[in-house]
Image (tube, rainbow, N blue to C red):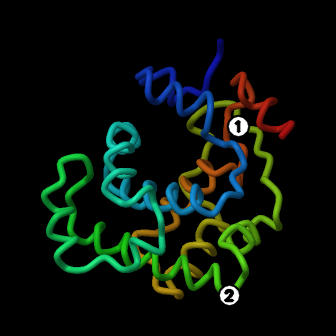
Amino acid sequence: MQRCDWVNSNPLALETKHHDKEWGVPVHDDRLLFEMLILESAQSGLSWATILKKRKGYLDAFDNFDARKIAKYTDKKIELLLQNKGIVRHKLKIIATIENARKFLGIQKEYGSFDTYIWSFVDGKPVKNSWHKLSDVPTSTPTSEMMSKALKKRGFKFVGPTTCYAYMQAVGMVNDHLVSCFRYPEIDSL
C-alpha cells in the first residue's frame, strides 16, 4: 500500500495509524479542532512523532481538551503541568495553551463555532492539491500566513505560518496527501 513519503520514511505504527485514519480528514468538530490546534502548537520545534507519542498524556493533562476548563487554569495548575512527563514541559507552550483556550472560546462566542471561523480561510471547503513528491509540499502558504496573522491579532500564541499550515493539513483544510498515496482519492471524495 503506497503512503505519503513522510510516513514511508518513518514508519512508526503511531504515525502510520494517524496518517491512515486521521491526517487530512476534514474536521468540523470544535473540540477536535481545538485539540489539533494545541497539538500542532506544541509541536513547534519538535517532531510530530514526539507529539503523537504524548497525545494521550495531553488528553489526560488538559481535561480532554475542554477549552472551558483549560481557560480557567491557575498558576498552581501550570506548576503541576510543568511536572507532567506525559506532555512537553515547556512553560511558554503551557501558558499559550491556556491563552489559546480563552481566545478559542471568544471566537466560538463571536462566530457561533470555531469551525465556522477557521474554515472561512478556505471558503468552507478543502483545498485540493496535487503533490507528486514530498519536496513539492510547501511548509506554509499565503493562506496559512493570513491565518497566522489573524490568529496572532486575536492573541493566539505559537501559531506561526508553518504551524498553521501543518494544522490545515491535519484537519483536512487542504488535501496534501501525495497523489500516489492511497489516501489521496479517499480524502478527495469526502
| Residue holding disc 1 | 131
Dot 2 lies on which element? helix
Check disc 2 and give the amino acid type.
Answer: Glu
Bin the neighbour count of mark 1 within 10 Å (Cα to Cα): few under 14, some 14-19, many 20 and up.
Answer: some
Q: Is residue 183 left or right of residue 157?
A: right
Upstream in the sequence, badge 1 or badge 2?
2
Element type where label 1 sits in the image: loop
Residue at the far top: name it.
1
Is residue 15 found left or right of 53 in the rendered image?
right
> What separation in Å lies between label 1 and label 2 (alpha carbons)?
36 Å
Q: Position of residue 86 (x, y in %)?
A: 24, 46
Q: Amino acid at mark 1?
A: Trp
Q: Residues within 10 Å of mark 2 (few under 14, many from 20)?
A: few
Task: Work out whether 30 lies above or below 138.
Answer: below
Identify the residue position indicated by label 2 in the image: 110
Residue 47 point in image, percent of width and height? 35, 43
Indicate whether 54 appears above or below 148.
Answer: above
